[in-house]
Image (cartoon, helix red, strand yellow):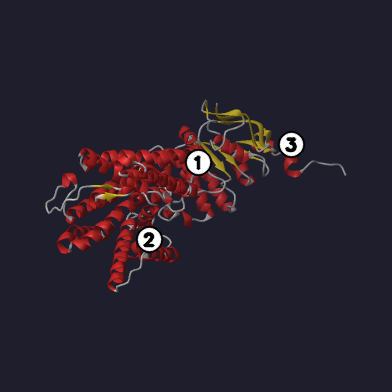
Amino acid sequence: MALLEVRSVSKSFRGLRAVTRASFEVPEGGLTALIGPNGAGKTTIFNMAAGVYAPDAGEIVFAGRRIDRLRPDQVCAAGVGRTFQVVKPFAGLSVLDNVIVGALRAERHVPQARRVALGILEKLDLLAKKDLPASSLTLPDRKRLEVARALATGPRLLLLDEVMAGLRPTECDQMVEVFRALNRGGLTILLIEHVMRAVMALARQVVVLHHGEVIAQGAPQEVVRHPAVLECYLGEETEL
Amino acid sequence: MKARLLMAALAAVLIALPWMAGNYVLSVATLALYFAFTGQAWNVMMGFAGQLSLGHSLYVGLGAYAAAALFTKFGIGPWAGIWLAMALCVAAGAAIGLLAFRFGISGVYFALLTIAFAEFTRIGFDHIGWLGGPGGLFLKVEQRTSIDLADLRGTPAMFYYVMLAFTAGAFALCAWLLRSRAGYYWQAIREDEDAARALGINTFRWKLLAVAISAAMTSFAGVFFAFYYNNLFPEQIFHISQSIEIILGPIVGGVGSLFGPILGAALLTALADSLNNMVSAMGWDIPGVKQVFYGVILLLVVMFLPNGIWPPLAKRLGLERKA
């Protein structure tokens, strides 16, 4: 069964078509990657799914319920957690307090939320840094914090926007392991990713976006051999 | 706990002050507490939730006029009047908040809106003849040595203790708020509103709550003002200089901290008053010397201690960061 369904969604910004009738599904328990060249419309689709903007046409259905007209906080309450491509830590708060804010969505009281937050920090290997101000973290740690905060809201679906970008290969592999473990625990994940190393290691299904349209979807090994995908990444084959 | 000990010592000194000091020192201390209290209230909006208000005189004025009108016109005492004062201030704050947050007005534009509301309320009250208009509203001054707490008539020591109780209450409320869900949500909104939304926070509702609580707290200061000074003029109580004076304490002391507003208010009031005394002892008459002095202090703090005096001081004293 599909947990998230994107149905023929379109979005333009001042006449510029960012996404054109894109359709795909994220199966429950799946690990799906959304890939495509820069400007393909990946983040736009994410922002529509997260309630930042409403699509011009089409609908987005999460767990059988339309979410494309909801506000970001309502989408989160419905069970969709997200990270931002450009990380947005609460810089003045400690690492732990950042995650507590997320945990307070489900736990109304701070002591319980703190317990949840500590558990998540441990999972993401940030426990040693819990009392540092978020502003003092390095980029890889900020990305981890971004994930920790989203996880703390208790989502059924996690939207990850380029969390591997800027990480070294070993750090990237660590993150891959974290997401694998989360996915094994039952969390459905949809990730936007440029780092193909991560995509090939993680995703069971890949959706390729180009100029705002879905040009291919399927298993990673199939998709990377798909002519349309090769064309958009490497250019058309020409006879000399 | 070092922090507990310091708190206890401070509380002891504050409680014992009327026995140790004369009426003059007591009046300065009352004024300092008044600004500590209003600064604390303002800090809920700006320091916690990141919403800059430059029109807190609106809530002081509304609170003062509401309680004073009930008292002078209907003989209803201040402790009943405070409910009307609070209701009016919350309504005014909610109106500003609804307008601003509904239409996504934030930052400097929000601050301008708060000034605008305070200013047109000031002008409006100039035209309410029933409340004296620009000529002012006066409470009957009685030279009393006895204490009538129910009607807030009494000795300087009584007023001092009332303001001390308000300030202590505001401190306790803010300390509790900061450690509750509201405090975490407000700080998240202050740091990054988009990220806060993505974590399921209905930022509209929580910002509105911050304004309502701040306004309700400030209404207490208004009621106190009316019964302490016994005269109200729209030109004075709604004036922007009143708003500015409220925010100087927390800015100098440390925006967003619990002790900042108290420290800042105490420091500014004490220093400004000594300066005034010094100037008059020299036989000089320099109008506006206090404002110039405030300006210099503000400049120095912004240049050298951009987070205010309290955070570095707390670090040096080895106290926890959050206080």
Q: Is the same chain shared between marks 2 and 1?
A: yes
- Output the chain of dot 3: A
Instruction: Please tell me in which quadrant of the rendered image residue B133 appears.
Output: top left
Q: Is residue A80 left or right of residue B46?
A: right
Picture coordinates of residue A36, whole percent (x, y): 67, 41
Q: Nearer the viewer, mark 3 or mark 1?
A: 1
Picture coordinates of residue B187, whole percent (x, y): 41, 48
In the image as oriented, which residue stretches furthest toward the left? B146
Picture coordinates of residue B168, whole percent (x, y): 25, 51
Which part of the image, by quadrant, shows the C terminus of chain A?
Answer: top right
Instruction: Please tell me in which quadrant of the rendered image residue A77 appears.
Output: top left
Q: Is the same chain shared between marks 3 and 1?
A: no
**Residues at marks 3 and 1 touching, judged by CB atoms closer than 8 Å:** no
- Output the chain of dot 1: B
Q: Which residue is mark 1?
A: B104
Q: CA distance from mark 3 to mark 2?
A: 62 Å
- Output the chain of dot 2: B
Q: Is residue B229 left or right of residue B302?
A: left
SS at mark 1 in the image: loop
Q: Which residue is mark 3?
A: A228
Q: Amino acid at mark 1?
A: Gly
Q: Is residue B54 left or right of residue B141?
A: right
Answer few, some or many: residues within 10 Å of disc 2's Cα (few below 14, many 20 plus, some between 14 and 19). many
Q: Which residue is mark 2?
A: B252
Res A122 seen here: no
